[in-house]
Image (cartoon, grey):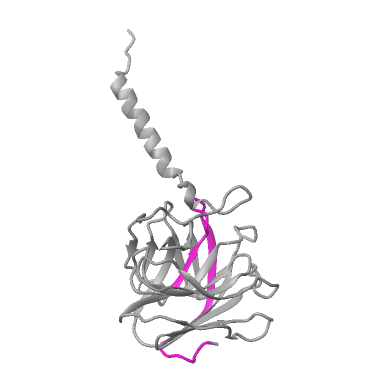
Amino acid sequence: MKYSIPLSLSLLAATAALTLARAQHPEAPQWSQPSSATHQQVPPPAGFHRPTVNFDVPIGIFDGQSDVGGPLLPGEASFDAETEAYTIDSASYNIWYFRDEFRYLWKRMSGDISLAADISFPDPDGYFDRKVVLIFRQELDDDAKETMVALHGGGLIHLATRPDKGADIEEDFRISPNEHTTPAPDKPVRLGIEKKGNTFTLWASVDGGPIQPIGETATLEFDEPFYVGIGFCSHLPVTSDRAVVTNLLFETEAGKVR
């Protein structure tokens, strides 16, 4: 005797399978796709947001971590107590425009801060615009007011600010890529940021010498406490990549970057 599955059950099974497939392989909206020969990444549609997912579990010196902007693929982070290395895995389309997506390791702080780290990318063939940030944020929402220094996979370094919640990020100063700013697995690049009052200074080594303050400063006023820490995005909305942050310096006063 033959038994047939009712059509409604078949449709339910197919729908469930499709839902699972989409969860495993989420589709990124066209605006979030990275720049290429045939496509230029553009800002998200007006009013587009995703909620941040927070993990209030300490990691290394940080109080917690977050997937800012609810990336389509969750991020991960780990800390090696022996080497004091932070490994961050993240997809996420960008940290730019009027909203961000990235994995963020953070502390809630007040006052002046000196922050610096060595940055490397284990995969030398990753997307050129992936970036590690040393970043101050007013809150954990995707459109928070913020100031950051960033090192891109292709070697671009910049200081940038989102002056108000929901505003577009403005670039304050940039260092064009060169042989000393392009990170490799065996050649980390040291990057730093100093907060002194409402003034933020980029620190970097652009000629192979010691880290030093470079270029124009940025000015932004934060309500206290604010968030400060390290983050990473692959710049590929559904493809994860990895960054490693070592030799982290985190001092609760200005003038300590080295």
Tell me residue 61's x, y (percent): 41, 77
Name which residue lies at 34% across and 10% down.
2
Q: Is residue 226 above or below residue 1?
A: below
Name which residue lies at 39% across and 62% down.
68
239 sits to left or right of 54: right
Q: Of 30 and 105, which appears nearest the observer?
A: 30
Tell me residue 104's x, y (percent): 42, 67
104 sits to left or right of 1: right
Q: Is residue 151 above or below residue 43?
A: below
Q: Is residue 247 above or below residue 92?
A: below
Tell me residue 47's x, y (percent): 35, 56
Name which residue lies at 63% across and 81% down.
205
Location of the N terminus by quadrant is top left
Name which residue lies at 63% across and 65% down.
154
* Span shown in magenta: 230-257
90 sits to left or right of 9: right
Residue 78 within the segment the image draws in magenta: no
Q: Of 146 and 1, which appears nearest the observer?
A: 146
Q: Of 189 and 95, which appears nearest the observer?
A: 95
Q: Residue furthest right?
A: 179
Residue 206, by quadrant, is bottom right
Number of numbered callouts drawn:
0
